[in-house]
Amino acid sequence: MSIVTCDLSVSVDGYVAGPHQSVENPIGEGGMALHQWHFGAEGADAAIVEEWQTGVGAYIMGRHMFGPDRGEWDLDWTGWWGDEPPYGVPVFVLGHRPRPSIQVGQTTFLFVTEGIAAALVEARAAAGEQRVAIAGGASTANQYLAAGLVDQLHLHIAPIVLGGPGERLFDGVPRTDLEPVQVVASPGVTHVKYALVRP
Amino acid sequence: MSIVTCDLSVSVDGYVAGPHQSVENPIGEGGMALHQWHFGAEGADAAIVEEWQTGVGAYIMGRHMFGPDRGEWDLDWTGWWGDEPPYGVPVFVLGHRPRPSIQVGQTTFLFVTEGIAAALVEARAAAGEQRVAIAGGASTANQYLAAGLVDQLHLHIAPIVLGGPGERLFDGVPRTDLEPVQVVASPGVTHVKYALVRP
């Protein structure tokens, strides 16, 4: 069965986005600082980016990562990524309201209303032998972590304190043992890959 | 002038102690897991422990790190560390109520009621050319970080999610840029030393 991985760029204080997210500022104030490391990444960072994107058979993301709309779907909105989203495999979007799947470039977005476990079953079926990647945001990652459904957590820790408000990685996640399996240090980011230890 | 450093063992979710701290369980439930790495440390970890304790001319700590009593001082309490505390230099304890300084083994504890800046002035005077180390806990570290008074933050990240309740490192600290200056990876802990970037 495919493994479930979660790659997240986080601040040292555990935020995956800056405060005050908006349509104009989807990653929140200062949030771009978390992602700076993978633009024009070279050397070890480039290898990490490559690994991050390789071998993924399906993604799962929270609704807020797909779009800014709330309540009823805005059917004209097809994601933050324009005509060619950087996924290229099925992306399962969690939500409470049904919506027909859409194809955008090489990526199909499918909307799941039956919760995180159901989404994982669908994503595993789509992924085959490849891995299922939890794309974010923090709330979605925390739900999968709290449910013990993540096998590997790869944190890309940007050297910045962002401050709140916002959802933090690990909020609501109960005591969990991890095992660091790889640490890569760059001037602009510290990559720590953890395996989740099963109780 | 001496620099101000802060070494803290933290969980991946940013806690320096487990939930439900008590006299019987001063580091909280599960909190010992944060410190496991420096008992019997070898190799790179031993070098980190050595560095942590070397060149410190004075420590500053919060009252809760000195003892479990609240309100009026329990003058029979002389700290968690028995007859020979592991400091050996002046330790400035923050509090709201005056108390005469006490000598325990090679360590003098001095009680400061005028706030963090006043404590730092006294600690610098005591430290001379050596560094002033902020010993913790989270609340004390956060106050010094928020005030921009820390030069170097050395995190020893234990591979465990502790969960709340409790005070987290960086709570109340506004946006701050850091620069990773040293990363050391061990099987049981990831050491990341940050320099604080002055605005």
Image: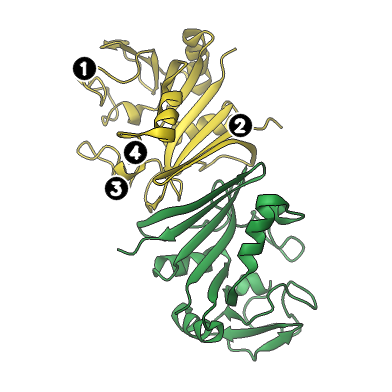
Chain colours: A yellow, B green
**C-beta proximity under 8 Å, tags 1 and 3:** no
Same chain, labels 4 and 3: yes
Q: Earlier in the sequence, mark 2 or mark 4?
A: 4
Q: How many marks?
A: 4
Which residue is tagged 1?
Answer: A83
Going by the numbered disc 1, the residue's amino acid type is Asp
x, y (%) of residue B160? 63, 43
Q: Earlier in the sequence, mark 1 or mark 4?
A: 4
Query: Residue at the right extreme?
Result: B83
**C-beta proximity under 8 Å, tags 1 and 4:** no
**C-beta proximity under 8 Å, tags 2 and 4:** no
Q: Residue at x 46, y 24 (%)?
A: A51
Going by the numbered disc 4, the residue's amino acid type is His
Q: CA distance from mark 2 to mark 4?
A: 23 Å
Q: Foreground: B180 or B69?
A: B180
Going by the numbered disc 3, the residue's amino acid type is Gly
Q: CA distance from mark 2 to mark 3?
A: 29 Å
x, y (%) of residue B108? 67, 85
Front tag of 4 and 3: 4
B66 is higher (above) or lower (below) than A37: below
Q: CA distance from mark 1 to mark 4?
A: 21 Å
Q: Which mark is residue A30?
A: 3
Q: Chain of mark 2?
A: A
Q: CA distance from mark 1 to mark 2?
A: 35 Å
Residue A173: name its quadrant.
top right
Same chain, labels 1 and 2: yes
Q: Which mark is residue A195?
A: 2
**C-beta proximity under 8 Å, tags 2 and 3:** no
Going by the numbered disc 2, the residue's amino acid type is Ala
Q: Chain of mark 3?
A: A
Q: CA distance from mark 1 to mark 3?
A: 26 Å
Label 1: element kind: loop
